[in-house]
Amino acid sequence: MQSLKTIKKRIHSVKNTQKITKAMKMVAAAKLRRAQQAATHARAYVAAVEVTAGRLVRAWRDDPHPLTVAKGKPGKKEFLILTSDRGLCGGFNSNLLRKVEETLKNCREQNIRTEARLIGKKGRDYFKAKRLEITEAATGLYENLDRKIAEELARVAIRRFEEGKTGEIWLVYNFFKSTLVQEVIFKKLLPVEDLDHGPRTTDHGLPADYILEPAGYTVLDKMLRELAVSRIYGGLLESVASELAARMAAMDNATKNASDMIGYLTLVFNRARQAAITKELMDIVGGAEALR
């Protein structure tokens, strides 16, 4: 049996850990509300851009925009993978990365070449540990996350697609559904397809109440580029909200487990102390009997 001093030190250590996990849970919960609002607002904006872009694509379906047509290498896919820089967030990263690894394996089996562009330290470390090929990796983007980061990522993706270096570009991220549920999403960025055309259009596919300035095709080009930016930025915001929700849940579980451990160790401590007291009493009684 462990000594009373050892058990007491373990209880003290677990209590200190519990304070940390409880504080981390509270910090994540405080940040989550703002992150959730940002992700929700981004969804509405992306949906509006998709509808507008869809109407314009339909209007020029006889003269399709280059970003809506796969013209690059048909046997090659690129994946822009959003993970976190920090850990202690449950299965947030591992669930996504396992699905990515499975997808890359399926692509190889179909003789489809792939490139992985990773955002986040955890994704980079996972690929290195698994000895998977990394085309590019960036860390520290979440510290000062803003739209300019998404604009740069979209600019690089669009340039590679327009130059024909890849046939498809996919965005992979955790979609925030609730504080307890986050869903891994594979969203095709390029070529742009499956857009909602929206209601009430003219014979030319444009909404009856739309007046386009400048020329419609110029607007189409700008909208498709804006769609790529907004989808990437929306994915980044969804990823941040999902990470915070996963961390809050993980720290809540850790805090509860610490409480259970403290209860168990306290019981062990009390039993050990009782056994020590009983032993001392028996020694005293035995000594008294020997003196008679």
Image (cartoon, helix red, strand yellow):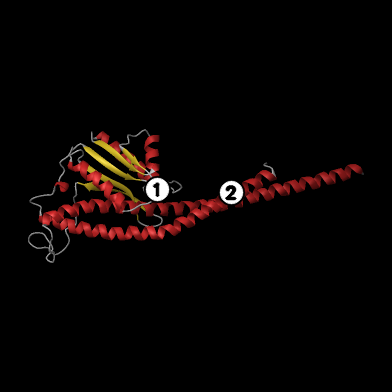
Sequence-wise first label, 1 or 2: 2
Compute the Cα span from label 1 to label 2.
25 Å
Tell me: 264 left or right of 88.
right
Indicate left or right for 11 with 27 as reference: right
Q: Is residue 25 above or below residue 85?
A: below
In percent of the image, x 13 and y 54: which residue is there? 218
148 or 233: nearer the eye? 148
Image mark for residue 171: none
Say what secondary structure mark 1 lies in. helix
Residue 13: where, in percent of width, then height? 60, 47
* Quarter of the C terminus within the rendering: top right
Residue type indicated by callout 1: Phe
Dot label at residue 92: 1
Residue at x 42% of width, y 57% of height = 31
Q: Residue at x 40, y 60 (%)?
A: 33
**Circle 2 is placed at which residue position?**
14
